[in-house]
Image (tube, helix red, strand yellow):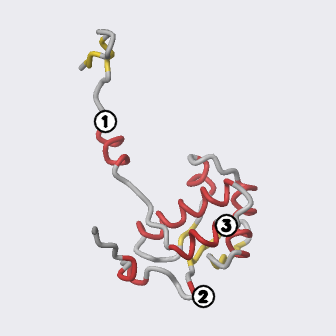
Amino acid sequence: MSEPLDGGVRVDIGTVGRRARRRSGQFVAVPMLWVERLAAARSAATLKLAMRLLWMHFRDRARPVRLANAVLAATGVSRGQKWRALTELERLGLVRVERRRRRSPIVTLIGAGGTKIMEHGCASNMHIRAP
C-alpha cells in the first residue's frame, strides 16, 4: 500500500504485523507516588527498569516479579545497570528486593507506607474520569 506525499511522491507504508499492532496499544500506568520519587532518579536505567517493573507487575496481577537479565536486555539495560537501578529503587522506597545467590531477584513493588501497590491486580484507587 502506498500513500501520496505533498510533492506527489508515493511512499510504500507496508502493513503492520499482528505482533506490532498488539504492542502499539500497550501502556504503563504510573502511580503519582512513583512519579514524584522517580524525579530524584540518577540514571535512565532506573527509569527504564521502573517502567518495566510496573508493566510486569500489572501483567502478573500484582504478584512479585522475578527479574531475569534477558527481560531487560531488550530495553537496553545491562546486568550491572539492573543491579544499580534496583538498589536505587530500594533507596527511593519503591521496591523490596529479595536477592538470591546466582538466581534472578524477586522484586515486590511498594507504595505509600511500605504497602504493596495495586493489590489483587486492580488499581481501584487510580480511576481517572474524563472531564
Residue at (44% x, 80% y) in the render: 118
**Residue 125 position (above or below residue 57):** below
Q: What element carries label 3?
A: strand
- x and y percentages locating residue 25 in the rendered image: 34, 51
How far apart marks 2 and 1 lie (CA) works out to 42 Å
Q: What residue type is labelled 1?
A: Gly
Q: Which mark is residue 17?
A: 1
Q: How far apart are marks 3 and 2 (CA)?
A: 25 Å
Q: Residue visible at 55% across and 82% down?
A: 111
Q: Is mark 2 on a helix, strand or loop?
A: helix
**Amino acid tagged 2:** Gly
Question: At which x and y percent is residue 74?
Answer: 56, 46
| Residue closest to the eye, 100 or 91 | 91
Q: Are marks 2 and 1 in contact (CB under 8 Å)?
A: no
Residue annotated with mark 3: 103
Going by the picture, which residue comes out furthest to the left?
1
Which one is in front in this view, the residue at disc 3 or the one at disc 1? Answer: 1
Indicate which label's residue lies in the foreground, 2 or 1: 2
Residue visible at 72% across and 66% down?
Answer: 102
Residue 120 located left or right of residue 90: left
Q: Is mark 1 on a helix, strand or loop?
A: loop
Task: Name the residue carrying label 2.
Answer: 114
